[in-house]
Image (tube, rainbow, N blue to C red):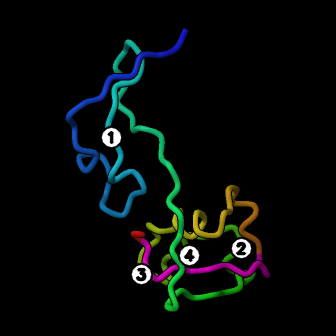
């Protein structure tokens, strides 16, 4: 039997920061216990920009997209965007020597 999903009028911004990938997601009640959660996140297609940076992951940044985010954007909050743009699904694939794109527009 499938679990019940009920849409709410609750703003996601009550739960997450403006840098979260869930900031524009719908808040839902999940199951009969009405557990508050978010609708499934769907990846956005990256629109390349001439201001995107191409970088190679250094040994000190291996497995640490949060540190790359801090260096590029001044905050660790965009680690997920770096992973998304580079189609990296597992943190253990964020390896030294790998060439990655660091997008200029982290909101698009």
Would residue 90 appear left or right of 34 to someone viewing this image? right
Label pair 2/4, CB-CB below 8 angstroms: no
* Residue 22 drawn above or below residue 98: above
Would residue 47 appear left or right of 24 to someone viewing this image? right
* Residue 18 drawn above or below residue 34: below
Q: Distance between the residues labelled 1 and 2?
A: 33 Å
Report the residue marked by disc 4: 67
Q: Distance between the residues labelled 2 and 3?
A: 18 Å
Sequence-first disc among 1 and 2? 1
* Residue 105 drawn above or below residue 108: below
**Circle 1 SS class:** loop
- The image shows residue 85 at horizontal and vertical percentages of 58, 68
Disc 4 residue crowd, few under 14, some 14–19, many 20+, Cα 10 Å: some
Report the residue marked by disc 1: 26
Q: Distance between the residues labelled 2 and 4?
A: 9 Å
Sequence-first disc among 2 and 3? 2
Q: Start and end of the magenta stretch?
A: 96-106
What residue is drawn where x is 73% and y is 81%?
99
Q: Nearer the viewer, residue 2 or 49?
A: 49
Report the residue marked by disc 3: 74
Q: Distance between the residues labelled 4 and 1?
A: 29 Å
């Amino acid at each position: 039997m499938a679990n019940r999903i009920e849409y709410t009028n609750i703003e996601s911004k009550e739960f997450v920061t403006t840098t979260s990938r869930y900031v524009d997601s719908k808040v839902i009640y999940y199951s009969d216990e009405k557990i508050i959660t978010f609708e499934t996140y769907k990846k956005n297609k990256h629109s390349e920009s001439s201001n995107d940076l191409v970088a190679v992951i250094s040994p000190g940044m291996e497995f640490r997209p949060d540190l790359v985010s801090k260096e590029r954007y001044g905050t660790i909050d965009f680690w997920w965007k770096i992973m998304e743009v580079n189609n990296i699904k597992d943190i253990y694939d964020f390896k030294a020597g790998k060439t990655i794109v660091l997008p200029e527009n982290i909101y698009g």
